[in-house]
Image (cartoon, rainbow, N blue to C red):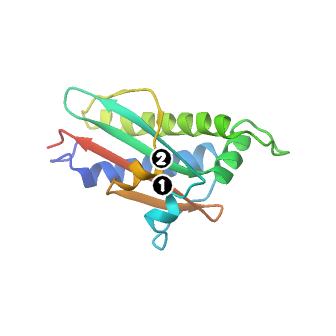
Amino acid sequence: MRPRELTQAWCDEVAASAFEGLLTGTFGRDVQRALDVTITGLLSSHALIVAVPLKGSQAHGQVFLSVPQALSAQLMNAFLGQTGGSNPDVSQLSDFVGELCNMLAGRFGALLADAGVELELGTPSSVSPAAAQQLARWLIWTCATLPIGLCVQMEGLQ
């Protein structure tokens, strides 16, 4: 399964597959690639943005996830099996998006391991919208009409 070259574009493809599998499989949510959402729209002041570092002997990098607070609450309630829809505070939502990003990074890491690249996951941390805007390769979807984005930055790939 290992491609001839582990490129950033290949990693984006693998991460997109992991992301879509997580949202559709674990959360039962339909996601559509969004071609009309700008980075500014994705990284609004109401977005929770988290990064999980990845470290390995062959490569290292980070997985970033941006989720609007309203969608974070919907996903958190679905994950916890709360059908009535609780009102979690921003701190709880931020923790949940960190866990969501960790789950995504784990799926991404498992797919890379299948290609012979072993990575360890670090601890999720919050990222400011200003810092997130400096990232060049955001992949954006819509879920429940809201934008949700993923950015993977890997170094040491050949």
Q: Nearer the viewer, residue 1 or 68?
A: 68
The residues bearing labels 1 and 2 have C-alpha atoms spaced at a distance of 6 Å
Which corner quadrant of the image does residue 51 belong to? top left
Regarding residue 66, the answer to whether it shows in the image is yes
Please state if 144 lies on the left or on the right of 17 as rendered.
right
| Residue 39 vertical position relative to residue 86 in the rendered view, above or below | below
What kind of element bears circle 2?
A: strand
Q: Which residue is mark 2?
A: 65
Q: Tell me the residue at 72%/39% (across/down).
A: 89
Label 2 Cα crowd, 10 Å radius (few <14 / some 14-19 / many 20+): many
Q: Which amino acid type corresponds to the residue marked 1 in the rendered image?
A: Gly
Q: Is residue 141 above or below residue 21?
A: below
* Residue 2, x across and y down, in percent: 23, 42
Residue lying at 33% horizontally and 57% vertically, measured from the top left:
137
Query: Looking at the picture, which amino acid does disc 2 mark?
Result: Leu
Residue visible at 48% across and 74% down? Answer: 36
The picture places residue 52, in percent across and down from the top left corner, at: 42, 35
Mark 1 lies on residue: 149
SS of the residue at dot 1?
strand
Q: Residue at x 30, y 45 (%)?
A: 153
Mark linked to residue 83: none
Q: Residue 1: in sight, yes or no?
A: no
Q: Percent position (x, y) of residue 99?
A: 55, 33
- Kindly indicate whether the residue at mark 2 contacts the one at mark 1 (C-beta within 8 angstroms): yes
